[in-house]
Image (cartoon, grey):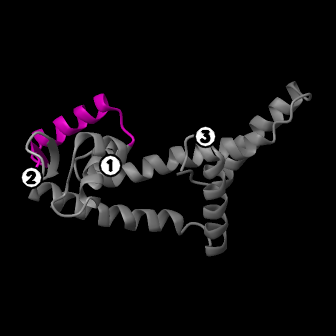
């Protein structure tokens, strides 16, 4: 994160000022929101990755493990369910599952409910890792969100929820 919160704000404002000077015919006010969202998202991604790296996994691998853990006992999903739950392409999912399987965190096996179907399931080691990583991940998210006061958190959550609902392909 930026050492001084005003640095990020000033950078976006400076870009807006430069565009306003060079193209006064175009309203650059959306950059104030979109530019700051981009900068915040990049910073948050870096801050969140610290926890995943400490557990020897990437954010994408955490996403797969978390989707399996959220499935409930027996902590498994079909590849199709896993792709839908993580919004990962089938090719990207296969690579992540391969790495997690090599690490002993998941296993591919026939479904207990349909012998023709295959599932990806958490191993005991995978469940222990995702539970510990999720605990630390939530503490980290609380720390990051805690940089805002409660009123700002509530307003931001409402605004982002409303905005997402209006964007294409969001539910």
Q: Where is residue 56 in the image (x, y as percent from the top left)?
A: 22, 47
Q: SS for tag 3? A: loop
Q: Which of 12 and 34 is in front in this view?
A: 34
Q: How many circles with numbers are drawn on the protein?
A: 3
Q: Distance between the residues labelled 3 and 2?
A: 37 Å
> Residue drawn at (55%, 46%), measured in percent from left and top?
170
Residue found at the very far right of the displayed protein: 25
In the picture of the structure, the residue carrying the numbered disc 2 is 112
Residue 128, quarter of the rendered image: bottom left
Q: Give the number of the disc on residue 168.
A: 3
Foreground: disc 3 or disc 2: 2
144 or 98: nearer the viewer: 98
Q: How crowded is mark 3: few (under 14 residues within 10 Å), some or many (20 or more)?
A: few
**70 vs 18, nearest the viewer:** 70
Q: Could you classify mark 1 by the number of other residues whose Cα lies within 10 Å: few (under 14), some (14-19), or many (20 or more)?
A: some
| Residue 103 falls within the magenta-colored stretch | yes
Residue positioned 45% across, 47% down in the render: 45
User: Where does residue 10 sit, x and y in percent of width and height?
Assistant: 73, 46
Whether residue 24 sits left or right of residue 88 in the image: it is right
Q: Where is residue 161 in the image (x, y as percent from the top left)?
A: 61, 58
Residue range of the region highlighted in magenta in the rendering: 87-111
Among the 4 quarters of the image, the one containing residue 92: top left
Describe residue 54's horizontal placement relative to residue 125 as left or right.
Answer: right
- The residue under label 1 is 63
Relative to 145, residue 102 above or below = above
Residue at 44% in and 47% down: 46
């Amino acid at each position: 994160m930026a050492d001084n919160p005003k640095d990020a704000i000033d950078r976006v404002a400076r870009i807006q000022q430069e565009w306003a000077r060079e193209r006064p015919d175009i309203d650059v006010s959306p950059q104030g929101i979109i530019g700051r969202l981009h900068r915040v998202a990049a910073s948050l991604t870096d801050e969140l990755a610290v926890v995943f790296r400490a557990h020897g996994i990437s954010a994408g691998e955490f996403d797969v493990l978390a989707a399996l853990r959220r499935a409930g006992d027996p902590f498994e999903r079909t590849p199709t369910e896993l792709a839908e739950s993580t919004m990962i392409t089938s090719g990207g999912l296969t690579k992540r599952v391969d790495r997690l399987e090599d690490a002993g965190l998941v296993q591919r096996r026939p479904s207990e409910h349909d012998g023709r179907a295959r599932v990806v399931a958490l191993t005991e080691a995978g469940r222990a890792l995702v539970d510990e990583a999720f605990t630390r991940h939530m503490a980290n998210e609380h720390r990051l969100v805690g940089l805002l006061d409660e009123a700002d958190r509530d307003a931001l959550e409402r605004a982002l929820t409303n905005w997402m609902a209006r964007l294409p392909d969001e539910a």
